[in-house]
Image (cartoon, helix red, strand yellow):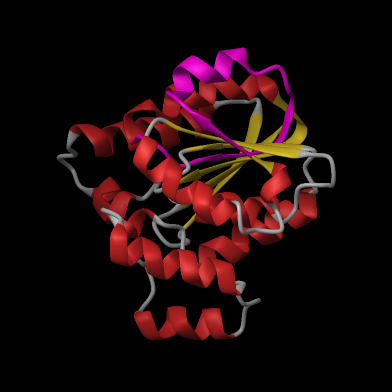
Amino acid sequence: MEFISKELLEYCESFSEKEEILLKELNRETHLKVNSPRMLSGPLQGRFLSFLSKMIKPKYALEIGTYTGYSALCIAEGVVEGGKLFTIDPNEETNAFAAQFISKSAQKEKIELVLGKAQTILPTLKQKFDLVFIDADKKNYGLYFDLIIDKVNTGGLIIADNVLWSGKILEERRDEETESIHQFNKKVNDDTRVENILLPIRDGLMLMKRK
């Protein structure tokens, strides 16, 4: 769900930095060949992720939920030379799809695709991260936050996607998935280790800065 009109979204995109040709191709191929293409970040959110990453210049970045690799390519644009973005996903099919596009990218040496469940892999990572993007199964957002918060450097940024869940977050009777997102938003807001702001960009982005 977009929280602005299609026309206003297109206006915003027209006055923002343009996505590169490879990202356009990835966007198109995802919509043609992969289930649930709305999961892809898209041009405006992708440019926002790239913008933040270029500001932070992370040595190590982390993504939980690769899907077809669009957001990984955007985040990797800001990773410094010699740095690495680890992107974790348990889906073999979409990982293979993402790998095809990552291999064509100028950022390919910066991206490490990790196949598996995040809750298993995260405890094994030894790096400290400057940027983390969470865009995976919503019921485990709180768990992922708990597993990565102490792996984020002071001043580092954590971003969680889909925290407005197509506006369902406002419903009085929330389904289980929506309630999980609401509890995650509350958990973040109550946690004194981060400063946070929830932005109505696309389906909602929660930004958290590690104190």
From this view, report whether residue 2 is shown above or below residue 205: below
Q: Residue furthest right?
A: 81
Identify the image quadrant of residue 5: bottom left
Q: Position of residue 196 (x, y in %)?
A: 59, 41
Q: Is residue 113 magenta?
A: yes
Q: How many marks?
A: 0
Q: Is residue 4 magenta?
A: no
Identify the image quadrant of residue 186: top left
Q: Quadrant of the C terminus?
A: top right
Q: Residue at x 67, y 49 (%)?
A: 108
Q: Give the magenta range.
A: 112-137
From this view, report whether residue 42 is shown above or below residue 80: below
Q: Residue at x 27, y 54 (%)?
A: 36
Q: Residue at x 37, y 35 (%)?
A: 91
Q: Quadrant of the N terminus?
A: bottom left
Q: Is residue 94 visible?
A: yes
Judging depth in this view, the residue of 178 and 129 nearest the camera is 129
From this view, report whether residue 193 is shown above or below residue 20: above
Judging depth in this view, the residue of 106 and 157 nearest the camera is 106
Judging depth in this view, the residue of 151 and 199 nearest the camera is 151
Q: Position of residue 67 (x, y in %)?
A: 42, 46
Q: Residue at x 35, y 41 (%)?
A: 93
Left or right of 202, for residue 211: right
Judging depth in this view, the residue of 46 and 102 nearest the camera is 102
Q: Position of residue 71 (x, y in %)?
A: 54, 53
Q: Is residue 69 visible?
A: no
Left or right of 49, for residue 96: left
From this view, report whether residue 11 is shown above or below residue 211: below
Q: Position of residue 184 (x, y in %)?
A: 41, 32
